[in-house]
Amino acid sequence: MKSAVIVFPASNCDRDAADALAKITGRDPLMVWHEETTLPPVDFVVIPGGFSYGDYLRSGAIAARSPIVQDIVRKAGNGLPVAGFCNGFQILTESGLLPGALMRNKGLRFVCRPQKLKIINKTSMFTKAYKDQTEITVPIAHFDGNYFADGETLNRLKKNGQIVFKYDGNPNGSVNDIAGICNEAGNVLGMMPHPERAVDPMHGGTDGIPFFKSVLESLR
């Protein structure tokens, strides 16, 4: 599997994502600078967490207008698998690839801790390798992780099986405890937790490994 990690000014999780992809796929991903206008030929793209552009305006708002994101939007529309973690989730909503918005955490506090998640959609291309697991623990680290969408959108997400992860113990006020969603086609996923930080027991857990294995298996 050929993969790519997008790099923005002030990204701080791009190397985490690269290490996770290299560990699980056996192949170093391409590191693609945000000013590139064309994505290289790859099978999977990760938009990493961090604080792109210092979170000015709104988290992810400036990065979503980067030249490379415009090409990702086009290619995701043709089926390219894309995953965004934390700030990457914010960028995906700001670019229109995913519905809803990420607002300031309830209580206006940065949260950083291991977080239990419930797997809601176990058949998605991002979760199928979890098999019988129904709950995982993945780190979170965010200030703008409070997911919001209107009632019509929420009903559509639920009906279409687009809610992939929910929090077990809501850390930020997200509506319906939503931690991660996918698009209707199922090839674009955004989540606030960081599966790329849960691939080594020395880092506290390995519940992120099946996430990346799911993508790898789906593309075989």
Image (tube, rainbow, N blue to C red):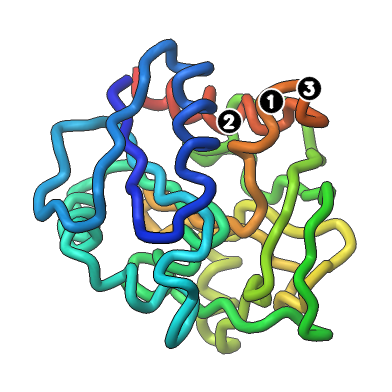
The residue furthest top is 26
| Amino acid on which disc 3 is placed | Met
Query: Which structural element holds mark 3?
Result: helix
Residue 5 is situated, as x and y percent measured from the top left of the image, at 36, 40
| Amino acid on which disc 1 is placed | Lys
Residue located 83% across and 53% down the image: 113
Quarter holding the C terminus is top left
Residue 134 is situated, as x and y percent measured from the top left of the image, at 79, 38
**Which label was assigned to residue 131?**
1
| Amino acid on which disc 2 is placed | Lys
Query: Which structural element holds mark 1?
Result: loop
Q: Are marks 3 and 1 in contact (CB under 8 Å)?
A: no
Residue 216 against residue 139 in the figure, above or below: above
> Pointer 2: what residue?
128
> Pointer 3: what residue?
202
Question: Reading the chain from its start, which is encountered first: label 3 or label 2?
Answer: 2
Q: Are marks 2 and 1 in contact (CB under 8 Å)?
A: yes
Spatial distance from mark 3 to mark 1, Cα to Cα?
Answer: 24 Å
Residue located 44% across and 60% down the image: 10
Q: How many numbered tags mark residues here?
A: 3
Residue 199 appears in view: yes
Residue 118 located left or right of residue 84: right
